[in-house]
Image (tube, coloured by chain):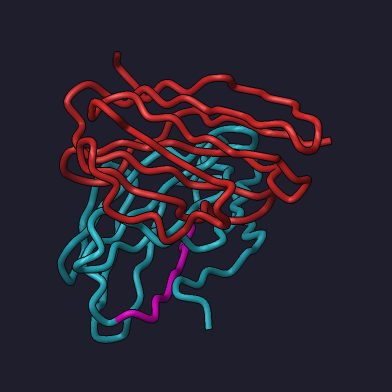
Chain colours: A red, B cyan
Amino acid sequence: GAGVSQSPRYKVAKRGQDVALRCDPISGHVSLFWYQQALGQGPEFLTYFQNEAQLDKSGLPSDRFFAERPEGSVSTLKIQRTQQEDSAVYLCASSSRGGPIFGEGSRLTVL
Amino acid sequence: QKEVEQNSGPLSVPEGAIASLNCTYSDRVSQSFFWYRQYSGKSPELIMSIYSNGDKEDGRFTAQLNKASQYVSLLIRDSQPSDSATYLCAVGVYNQGGKLIFGQGTELSVKP
């Protein structure tokens, strides 16, 4: 596609539920990133893929967070046993050369 | 000390004026620098990238980089009300792949 596509755009989960957020990057982009953005803050790095290899997951806040990109294209960010502090916008970005291009984000609200 | 620092603002300028946005960073091995614009409720949009010392111009935007002083700035000439947004500075560090560290953003308000 022309841009980075994320789904769902909005997700409301009850505390303790598992959620999965999908990212479809720009075709041909090797690098894929996940960021978390809280209200009024800049995006915080979560994890980075180059093709199917997860090269950096240092930003994942806990072992409840898991990301995969099995075929080097679409990526999924999974959050297990969601907590209220997980409420945020989750941004996916992809790049070939140059700065990452962001999708519209998935807004997660945990009740 | 935060790795990338920006004044949160708001920075208010009149229409037609030059808006100057500043960013400092702490890691001396930083190699790539980006400015993103983020409208309220939207995702960040890449507007400028700069990799070497000096100025880079693109339309009404000029990015300035000074690695010795560890700062990067964005100038917006002939500011328009449609430029009102939060501007995010992002820094890429050598040997950390494409990982970017973002500042908290500066809110810009352009008054008609």
Where residue B94 sits in the image (x, y, percent)? 20, 68
Q: Nearer the viewer, residue B62 or A92?
A: A92
Quadrant that contains the N terminus of chain A: top left
Magenta stretch, overall SS:
strand
How many numbered marks have been drawn onto this rendered protein structure?
0
Where residue B75 sits in the image (x, y, percent)? 39, 58
The range drawn in magenta is: B18-27
Image point (77%, 36%), residue name: A110
Side of A75 relative to B66 (left or right) = right
Image point (45%, 75%), residue name: B3
Membership of A74 in magenta stretch: no
Side of A39 relative to B6 (left or right) = right
Image point (67%, 53%), residue name: A40
Q: Quadrant of residue A68?
A: top left
Q: Is residue B82 visible?
A: yes
Where residue A67 sits in the image (x, y, percent)? 43, 39
